[in-house]
Image (tube, rainbow, N blue to C red):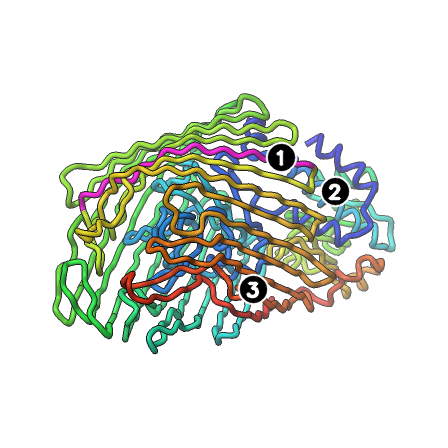
Amino acid sequence: MKYILLLVIPMITLYASELASLLTQYNQETQIHKETKKESAGHIIVMTRNDLDRMQAYTLNDILNTIRMFNLQASRNGGTCLSFATAKSGTVPPIKIFINNHELNNLTFGNPIAQYGAMNLYFVDYVEIYQAGNSVTFGNESGSMVIRLYTKKPELENATYSELTVDTRGSTQLNILDAQVIDSDYSYLLNIDLNNRNMKKTAYQGKDLSRDYAIGHLFFQFNKKNDYHIEIGATSGKLDLFTAFSLSPSKDDLRGENVYLEVDKKLPYKMNLRLSASVERNYVDYRDQNTIALSNGVKASSVAFDGQTSSISAILEKHFITHKNDLTIALKIKQNRGDLESFSADGIPYNMIEGPTRFNIYSIYGENLYSFDDNNLLTIGLKYDYIKDNYNAKARKSFIYRLGYVSHYQSFTNKIFVFNRQNQPTMGEMSFTPAKVKPNPELDPTKMNIVSAESLYSFSKKAQIGIGAAYATVKDIVVVDPIKKQFVNGNKSMEFERVYLNINYTFDLNNKITTQLYKIYRDHSVSPASGALFQLFNTVGKIDIYNELVYRAAYTNEIGKHMHAGYDYTIALAYAFSKHSTLKLKGENIFNKASEIYIYDNPSQEGISVAARDQRALLSWEYEF
Amino acid sequence: MKKLFVISLLFTISLFADSKTLMYEIIGTVLDNLSTPKQKIIYSDDKDLLKALSKHYAISQTCQESTFIILQKEQLPKECQSKDIFVLNYNLLRSVPQSIGAFFFQKGRANIVLLQPKLQKHNIKASPELKPYLEEKIW
């Protein structure tokens, strides 16, 4: 404390003349992302609240679009998916998304972005993205990238505010947030989001293909300081399924609901208990102008089904902290369950389940951070999973490790991670797929070995450059056997290298520029293998200005179709015309040149090209009550 | 433990120091720009703040002997409730109705509010530097 006072005293006598400037500096210094950022957990991208506000990031897709080494793509199902650069469009890497400590599940397809990409970010304070070697203490099954969304803290909000947004396609979105401290110990956050989104219709053979959606989302959190927090999230919506089964739908409705509950309780002796439950239900009503081939070999022109998945888990964590060690050990029990309540094709019911529907997962994991000194840290993480399902006699066992070394010397920060990963097949791949491809209950997990390194150099407080590289080998990749029309483990192993470069320059507290460049080296690439991001944040008087350009390289897809390079340019302006009101204007995909994917039913027939984000302009009014 | 904290969060401690420094600097600037009828003798239940201010202002270890109170959380005895009170918490601005202003977080950002009617009642004059922070009422 003494040294704080030593700093304070001379500064108090100086008293900077600009109170507004001091407040801006203070707001920068007290941004809460600094509390959770875990340098030893991977290569991190942080989007602060200030960044998100100025980016006018309305949905999760707005930030996913900027992530290096991934391509945000339109999905055949009408939503979006985030595919690894070079991979076939629609290939779903195991990306893990957390709201605070709760992992958002998608048990059927393993792709939470399908439901949550359109999720509003109004209740989110900041975002951390961990690439390569995410810490086992996050508690998730192994994934390629972890995206952590941290919600706003009621004690820093003390307000009720709302935002109304309209766009040039006739969409409307209303958000209302209320966050208060009830007395010094209790607080809550309530967020309600109603989103009616109209997307550009894609014409195909005289018909318009729609991917419009309407979603309502509720988030409620109740906290007792230093004791527990309870969190409830619920989403209900309907979605036009676009081209999920074919390019010739005559009706393609999906209705879905999901709800989760998470309780986090601090226990004595530095222990923590986390209980979580989630349920998701989807109803599909689909009719086609022609017939579609189902995974059981039947051909039908209409399909209706009602499926439910659920997950419950308990995690008990214990921390041991000594002079040089910070050890976390945890036990986790989780049950994932998928039930197909009904399935019919042309009105005839079928049993489409071919594999396990219940998975009991027992995990033990631990991670130690060992400090050699103030500037050198070694991290070792181990995780063992025992997975028993209700179909296969033999249990699956998975063991993963992660070694990391982080050093800081003068202006250099260096990180290196060596780790393996086992991505378990999804329920969709093992047990149930409605159309075209048969599931395979015998699938093995995909196995990866990865080495990744990153070096960051700060020229000054204003300028920073970062260079990263990784090498990975992958085997037992889940692919579709074109003859059996079934998911199988590919017998070829694959390897790839990737490199990236970041350059950030901060002009002053309100003005900065960030750039990212990356390239993936892989033998067989069928989506953009390189890309770039340029972000320019400016404040001129009372106006915040944001410019963003997302570049994705041209590529040739899996059927030899050449796809043009993508230039997704966004500009956002915000003007606070009073303490309580802000007017915002944003243009997305302004040149209508964003990277596209090619969707086809048959390589010999014409398909359609679609970008993940429409060209549109948005106008928002935010009001604080 | 400290070493571990430093390396795992990479300089969080120094950032914390900076934010405390800035907060004290902000409060000092507000005080400097408020002219009170009596000499300011400061009392605060935030002892670190009080120590920091002691180099520039007369301070008191009790609210009774002070003329200007900067309140973080404690409840004031009756005899102190009519003094000039500046609070460091949004809820206190509502629960201590005589407070003349506050430094607090709202919508994730630090704010300063000085209530014009309360300043007038206490015969306190705010310099032009504080004009952007003057409000007629708590919103």
Give, as a three-letter code, the residue at label 3: Thr
Q: Is A223 placed above or below A168 here?
A: above
Give the x, y percent position of residue A345: 16, 68
**Crowding at mark 3 (Cα within 10 Å: few <14, some 14-19, many 20+):** some
Sequence order check, earlier mark of 1 and 3: 3
What mark, if any, has residue B62 been given in the picture? 2
Q: Is disc 2 surrounded by few (<14), some (14 to 19) or many (20+) residues within 10 Å?
A: few
State the image quarter where residue A328 is shown. Answer: top left
Q: Is residue A456 magenta?
A: yes
Which residue carries the number 1 mark? A457
Magenta-highlighted stretch: main secondary structure?
strand
Under circle 1, the secondary element is strand
The percent position of residue A181, horizontal first and vertical second, equals 55, 55
Q: Position of residue A414 (x, y in %)?
A: 55, 31
Cα gap from disc 2 to disc 1, whole angstroms: 50 Å
What number is the disc on residue A160?
Answer: 3
Q: Secondary structure at mark 2?
A: loop
**Image point 47% across, 54% down: which residue?**
A554
**In the rendered structure, which amino acid carries the disc numbered 1?**
Tyr
Q: Are marks 3 and 2 in contact (CB under 8 Å)?
A: no
Most foreground residue, A44 or A98: A44
* Towards the viewer: B49 or A321: A321
Host chain of mark 1 = A
Please identify the quadrant where the C terminus of chain A is shown: bottom right
A299 horizontally vs A267: left or right: left
Q: Is residue A505 visible?
A: yes
Q: Is residue A573 magenta?
A: no
A583 lies above or below A472: below
